[in-house]
Image (cartoon, rainbow, N blue to C red):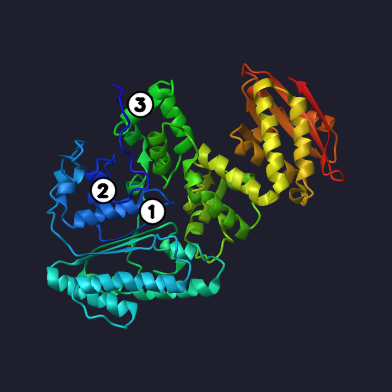
């Protein structure tokens, strides 16, 4: 049954108490929370930004603070019924523990001085709370005193929750001096998490990068890393089961408002926001930020990239070895690569995975090897657009992209291939920066990047039994098999398409199949000839 009004969605709200008491939708993760707190003690979890890590930390804080009222069924002041959550039906005793919570997610941590100020502010608050005399001692000594005082006053062991521990580290990659100072601060602050283990009830640390990579917790080797464990794949984000149960009313309403049926709307949301995998089980996970933004607005858009991701990715690309889209989508990555310490972006694939731009597409157990790729259309388009902006890096490039996009849309809607090729020539002529590499692959990769940034259904290096077509563009009114030749004729490109059977795999498709041969001149640095033939 379709609901008549949108529910309240917690976009940007990371407080579990606020979500429950103010009537926001909460997808119940407390079964996994209960598993964690009853089966282990010190944990680490890595997830991309805006995937619900802070909300999970807030939920854990509410559990250990004994806030059973937040987990039972109740009606908010606004008359919204909140259901009972899983953990409220368990044998959890709801005792109140002292909770030390550290939040390093602030975006203004740009200097060591600001980091010191934040740590001092947090420690001073705990010292006042537990009657510990103010001190100029080291962070580790102050932390030890706070732990002892909290346990002595409450009669309970201490819970330590650390959110986004690596925020400042990730924003200072390439600055070796600052990296060393940040590492020094955190190694000092968190040293008691091992030495005072007997006084700790529970420890939970979140970040984007695995802790082994930053060298901060090198001495804290008892942490259990659940980032890629099958049992915890769904602890952040929205699973397919949760989509079709807890969020079914929201999909139905969005479908009704967009003139679609339920299955069609689910397919659109899946195409744009699903596809994240955080372990070998490859359980499908939706991006919760984009999903709730779509439910709230009633429209599908690129919300994750609009929330500051574009600038961050361009900054990352500026420090990485040169990439093109075909380098990262479907690329193998050894398991040990995820554990390599890094203080730069010289190893881009694990960084792109942990940042949420890539995900696990396959796992090859015989090699202990992962295959990484884009999780969904939102990320695929956004990554391509960022890569295009970074590589072209000119006003002409941005202006010509707009012209080219209009030509592409005309081509898509009306099949006007000649006008599209002419626009393509204008594009290459206006962006000389991108033509520095004198090889065929570079031009084909840039064309592929452009198509992706427009949201086109395009395949690079489309595999057939005898080779790979450079590009296959699937349009509503035709399938275009495109071969680019560097300093060779378009006839040679068309012959290659025929001889290697690139088009045969689409023979059963009802759409016309068109072969396109493009000849790229190294002297002109542009397309000089082209031909097309319908199969």
- Quick one: 296 or 245, which is closer to the camera? 296
Q: From the viewer's perspective, is residue 201 above or below residue 11? A: below
Give the numbered dot on residue 253.
Answer: 3
What crowding class fits label 1: few (fewer than 14 Cα within 10 Å), some (14-19), or many (20 or more)? many
Q: Is residue 533 left or right of residue 338?
A: right
Spatial CA span between label 3 and label 2: 24 Å
On-image quarter of the N terminus: top left
Residue 123: % across, % down? 29, 72
Choose top left, top right, bottom left or bottom right for residue 247. top left
Q: Position of residue 456 (x, y in %)?
A: 61, 32
Dot 3 crowding, Cα within 10 Å, few <14, some 14–19, many 20+: many
Describe the element under mark 2 as helix, strand or loop.
helix
**Position in image of residue 483 (x %, y %):** 75, 34
To which quarter of the image does residue 481 belong? top right
Residue 134 to residue 49: above or below: below
Q: At 64% across and 58% down in the image, what residue appears?
A: 321
Pointer 3 or 2: first along the chain: 2
- Image vertical order of residue 84 relative to residue 126, above or below: above
Q: Kindly identify which residue carries mark 2.
A: 18
Mark 1 or 3, closer to the camera: 3
Up-down relation of residue 468 to residue 305 (above or below): above
- Residue picked out by circle 1: 227
Q: Quadrant of the C terminus?
A: top right
Give the mark nearest the N terminus, 1 or 2: 2
């Amino acid at each position: 049954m379709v609901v008549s009004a949108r529910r309240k969605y917690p976009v940007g709200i990371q407080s579990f108490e606020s979500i429950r008491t103010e009537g926001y939708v909460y997808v119940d993760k407390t079964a996994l929370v209960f598993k964690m707190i009853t089966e282990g003690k010190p944990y680490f979890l890595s997830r991309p930004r805006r995937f619900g890590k802070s909300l999970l930390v807030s939920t854990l804080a509410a559990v250990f603070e004994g806030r059973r009222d937040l987990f039972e069924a109740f009606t908010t002041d606004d008359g919204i019924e909140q259901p009972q959550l899983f953990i409220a039906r368990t044998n959890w005793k709801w005792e109140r523990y002292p909770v030390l919570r550290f939040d390093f997610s602030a975006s203004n941590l740009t200097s060591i001085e600001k980091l010191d100020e934040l740590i001092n502010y947090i420690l001073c608050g705990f010292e006042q709370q537990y009657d510990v005399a103010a001190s100029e001692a080291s962070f580790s000594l102050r932390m030890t005193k706070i732990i002892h005082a909290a346990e002595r006053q409450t009669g309970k062991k201490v819970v330590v929750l650390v959110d986004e521990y690596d925020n400042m580290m990730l924003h200072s990659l390439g600055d070796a001096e600052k990296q060393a100072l940040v590492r020094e601060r955190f190694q000092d602050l968190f040293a008691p998490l091992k030495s005072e283990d007997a006084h700790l009830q529970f420890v939970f640390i979140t970040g984007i990068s695995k802790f082994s990579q930053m060298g901060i917790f090198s001495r804290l080797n008892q942490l259990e890393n659940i980032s890629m464990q099958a049992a915890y794949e769904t602890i952040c984000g929205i699973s397919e089961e949760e989509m079709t149960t807890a969020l079914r009313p929201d999909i139905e309403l969005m479908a009704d408002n967009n003139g679609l049926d339920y299955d069609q709307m689910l397919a659109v949301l899946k195409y744009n926001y699903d596809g994240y995998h955080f372990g070998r089980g490859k359980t499908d996970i939706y991006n919760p930020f984009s999903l709730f933004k779509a439910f709230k607005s009633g429209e599908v858009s690129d919300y994750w990239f609009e929330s500051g991701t574009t600038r961050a990715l361009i900054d990352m690309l500026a420090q990485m070895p040169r990439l093109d889209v075909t380098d990262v989508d479907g690329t193998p990555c050894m398991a040990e690569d995820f554990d390599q310490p890094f203080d730069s972006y010289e190893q881009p694939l694990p960084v792109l995975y942990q940042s949420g731009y890539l995900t696990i597409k396959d796992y090859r157990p015989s090699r202990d090897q992962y295959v990484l790729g884009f999780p969904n259309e939102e990320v695929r388009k956004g990554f391509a657009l960022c890569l295009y902006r970074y590589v072209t890096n000119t006003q002409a490039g941005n202006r010509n992209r707009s012209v080219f996009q209009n030509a592409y849309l005309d081509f898509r809607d009306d099949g006007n291939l000649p006008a599209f090729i002419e626009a393509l020539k204008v594009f290459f002529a206006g962006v000389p920066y991108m033509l520095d590499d004198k090889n065929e692959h570079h031009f084909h990769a840039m064309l592929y990047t452009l198509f992706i940034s427009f949201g086109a259904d395009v395949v690079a290096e489309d595999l057939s039994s005898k080779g790979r077509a450079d590009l296959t563009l699937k349009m509503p009114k035709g399938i275009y098999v495109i071969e680019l030749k560097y300093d060779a004729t378009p006839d040679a490109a068309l012959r290659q398409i025929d001889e290697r059977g690139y088009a045969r795999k689409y023979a059963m498709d009802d759409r016309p199949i068109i072969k396109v041969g493009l000849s790229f001149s190294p002297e002109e640095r542009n397309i000089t000839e082209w031909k097309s033939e319908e199969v």
